[in-house]
């Protein structure tokens, strides 16, 4: 069976099968069942003409690991199948992937349209670095689709989307904004980190380039950095050239860890999403919570659109606490089953305010301008038992409010989970 046929076969397999086998139905050296970690910086050739042909891309092979590496290539093939892309390019971090894409497709005198409340690092590129290059940047209110369409219609070269957004969990209508971009010939880039390839496939919705911080859900264990960009080969060849010259290539050991992490993505996400739905619904009833952001809630402004373009609502929740940062500093230390850290997508539950997580690079004034409250807390729900996460949160709120906490029983939690399913 050819590699192409195997890839086609994987497309009809279930997600739990695809995350395991995608990109890995190849013959490894020594008949190894797992992808080897190839640590060689360079690859030698006895035949000089063959070496030259490989260097020119006329023959398959490897020359230098900044350009390509056998272990990294398996990861790229895996993401190609999961995102249904022709090609993929791996980077050393998620931000390297995002900045690499934007610097590949934007230059002086060109224009990019995006939204105000994207991830803080991405926002810094839009606000600080691209203007230095002479790129015209227009950031719109994420909720105002008509305003985004209007700015796109004025003419632009790139439309950059992040949905769901970090950390406010806003939802963009991908199909509608892709249609607007097509009318002016703009390239559409989408950050799919929060959704993962299991919950959302932007390329299938018309997007040109998909970006992932592989540090997050793809690796899933909080122990590695990486980024991946997916799309058509004629676009990825440009991104690959940028990466080769600028040097932000992914190392093979990190690639191996991400490959290993992806194999359990379906299992992890299933538990994480089930818990996220239950926790989000509980937070809606908590007196110390001002508002809850989770697209799985029917009252969420983007719920209907999310249902139309996503297969699941993800494992990230954010909520705003009454009393702002003062309540945040009292609540978070009381949690037993949570890291207080600036990461997400790991097997452990992680809590953190925007000022030390998604928007640590931004000043208070910048966060306020972006509509991000100091009382906003982002939760990355882990794979722990739902009843334990819920009880832990309830006891923490009870202590903060000095009230008798009535934690949910195991039976009540199971009933809630069945309702979600």
Image (spheres, rainbow, N blue to C red):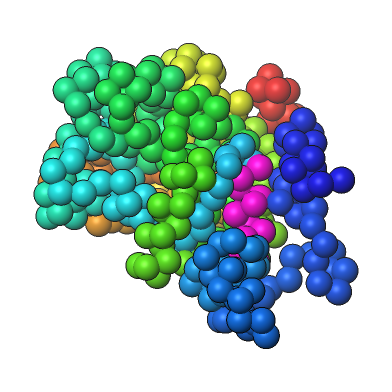
Residue 157 in view of the camera: yes
Name above or below for residue 355 compared with residue 42.
above
Task: In the displayed orientation, state which residue is furthest to the front.
Answer: 49
Give me the residue at 64% from left, 68% from top: 61
Name above or below for residue 263 compared with residue 7.
below
> Which of the 4 image quadrants contains residue 4?
top right
Name above or below for residue 314 compared with residue 132.
above
Give me the residue at 66% from left, 50% from top: 78
Q: What predominant SS class does the magenta segment belong to?
A: helix
Comparing 50 with 381, the one in front is: 50
Residue 213 in view of the camera: no
Comparing 375 with 165, the one in front is: 165
Residue 259 placed where, x, y %?
66, 58
Taking 142 as reference, is 300 left or right?
right
Q: Locate the N terminus and report the quarter of the image it occupies.
A: top right
Q: Locate the C terminus and report the quarter of the image it occupies.
A: top right
Q: Is residue 80 magenta?
A: yes
Label count reads 0
> Which of the 4 image quadrants contains residue 252?
bottom right
> Which of the 4 image quadrants contains residue 74?
bottom right
Residue 174 placed where, x, y %?
42, 24
Comparing 325 with 55, the one in front is: 55
Taking 375 as reference, is 415 left or right?
right
Q: Which residues are magenta?
A: 71-81
Give me the residue at 37% from left, 18% from top: 179
Residue 387 placed where, x, y %?
67, 39
Give me the residue at 63% from left, 57% from top: 75
């Amino acid at each position: 069976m050819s590699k192409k046929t195997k890839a086609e076969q994987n497309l009809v397999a279930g997600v739990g099968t695809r995350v395991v086998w995608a990109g890995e139905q190849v013959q490894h050296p020594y008949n190894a069942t797992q992808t080897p970690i190839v640590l060689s910086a360079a690859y030698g050739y006895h035949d000089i003409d063959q070496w030259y042909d490989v260097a020119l891309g006329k023959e398959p092979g490897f020359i230098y690991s900044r350009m390509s590496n056998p272990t990294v290539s398996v990861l790229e093939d895996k993401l190609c199948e999961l995102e249904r892309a022709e090609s993929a390019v791996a980077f050393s971090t998620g931000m390297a992937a995002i900045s690499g894409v934007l610097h590949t497709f934007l230059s002086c005198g060109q224009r990019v349209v995006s939204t105000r409340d994207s991830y803080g690092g991405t926002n810094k590129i839009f606000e600080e670095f691209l203007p230095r290059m002479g790129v015209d940047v227009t950031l719109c209110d994420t909720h105002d689709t008509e305003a985004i369409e209007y700015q796109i219609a004025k003419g632009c070269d790139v439309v950059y989307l992040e949905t769901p957004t970090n950390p406010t969990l806003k939802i963009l209508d991908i199909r509608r904004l892709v249609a607007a971009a097509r009318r002016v010939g703009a390239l559409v880039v989408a950050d799919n980190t929060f959704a993962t390839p299991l919950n959302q496939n932007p390329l299938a919705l018309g997007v040109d380039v998909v970006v992932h911080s592989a540090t997050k859900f793809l690796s899933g264990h909080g122990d590695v950095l990486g980024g991946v960009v997916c799309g058509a080969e004629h676009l990825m060849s440009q991104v690959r050239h940028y990466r080769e010259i600028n040097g932000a290539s992914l190392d093979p050991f990190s690639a191996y860890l991400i490959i290993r992490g992806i194999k359990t993505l379906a299992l992890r996400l299933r538990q994480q999403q089930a818990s996220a739905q239950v926790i989000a619904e509980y937070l809606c009833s908590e007196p110390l919570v001002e508002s809850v952001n989770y697209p799985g809630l029917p009252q969420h402004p983007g719920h209907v659109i999310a249902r139309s373009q996503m297969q699941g609502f993800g494992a990230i929740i954010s909520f705003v606490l009454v009393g702002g940062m003062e309540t945040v500093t009292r609540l978070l230390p009381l949690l037993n089953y949570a890291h207080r850290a600036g990461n997400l997508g790991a097997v452990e539950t992680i809590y953190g305010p925007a000022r030390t997580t998604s928007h640590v690079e931004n000043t208070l004034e910048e966060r306020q301008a972006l509509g991000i409250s100091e009382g906003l807390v982002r939760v990355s729900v882990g794979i722990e038992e739902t009843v334990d996460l819920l009880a832990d949160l309830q006891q923490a709120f009870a202590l903060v409010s000095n009230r008798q906490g009535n934690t949910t029983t195991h039976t009540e939690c199971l009933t809630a989970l069945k309702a979600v399913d």
